[in-house]
Amino acid sequence: MSVKIKLMRLGKIRTPHFRIVIADSRSARNSKAIEEIGRYSPASEPSLIEVNSERVQYWLGVGAQPTEAVTALLKITGDYQKANGLPGSEGTLKPQPVKIDKRVAYEAAVKEAMNEPADGATTLKKKAAEKLAAKNAPVVEESAPVAETPVAQEAAAVEQPAVEQAAPEAEQTPAEVVAEAPAEETPQA
């Protein structure tokens, strides 16, 4: 009886998982196996490859032939090189990332949410946003008129031609605006 080291496919459609098994070469892919020596999951990044190195060395030593796919996996783990006395027996297997416990991740998210201000937590409705903007906007109070200095008088004289140009526009505006315009034009002497 010839023995092969091959993959046994498990999992759903488009989400394969494989077991690395020792089986008779004449048996079907998913038929009964002699021994399971590892597993392979290509869906994760990096791919999950777990192999019982001691059992692989034994089966390769007694003449079991790996399939092409299993040979590639054993080269990644370094077991193929170790069995054949080739350099590179340390392999190139990438370690799996550490999984964070769901409960720890949830508690961290809750703690972070508690530290956020309530104002910026959600998008506010239009009226609520306007109220918040009005509340946060600094209130500008009009101060009492200050006694004009000579510098202020010169600035008012410079502004006067601009006001005179606005006067023709005042004829077209309503009477209320016209009534306010002359009050602004009178300079204090």
Image (cartoon, rainbow, N blue to C red):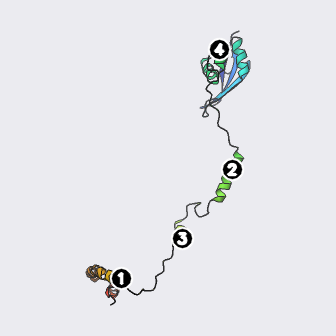
Give the tally of numbered discs: 4
- Residue on which disc 3 sits: 136
Q: Nearer the viewer, mark 4 or mark 3?
A: 4
The quarter of the rendered structure image containing the N terminus is top right
- Label 1, residues with CA under 10 Å away: few <14, some 14-19, many ≥20: few
Label 4, label 3: how many angstroms apart (C-alpha)?
75 Å
Q: Nearer the viewer, residue 152 or 139?
A: 152
- Residue on which disc 1 sits: 152
Say whether marks 4 and 3 touch (CB < 8 Å): no
Label 2, label 4: how many angstroms apart (C-alpha)?
49 Å
Relative to 131, does residue 189 appear above or below in the rendering?
Answer: below
- Label 2, residues with CA under 10 Å away: few <14, some 14-19, many ≥20: few
- Residue on which disc 2 sits: 106
Q: Residue at x 46, y 83 (%)?
A: 143
- Residue on which disc 4 sits: 85
Q: Nearer the viewer, mark 1 or mark 4?
A: 1
The quarter of the rendered structure image containing the C terminus is bottom left
Label 2, label 1: how many angstroms apart (C-alpha)?
64 Å
Does residue 28 appear in the picture of this structure?
no
**Amino acid type of the residue that numbered disc 4 sits on in the rendered structure:** Gly
User: Quick one: SS at disc 2?
Assistant: helix
**Amino acid type of the residue that numbered disc 1 sits on in the rendered structure:** Ala
User: Quick one: SS at disc 3?
Assistant: helix
Label 3, label 2: how many angstroms apart (C-alpha)?
33 Å
**Amino acid type of the residue that numbered disc 2 sits on in the rendered structure:** Tyr
User: Quick one: SS at disc 1?
Assistant: helix
Q: Residue at x 55, y 61 (%)?
A: 123
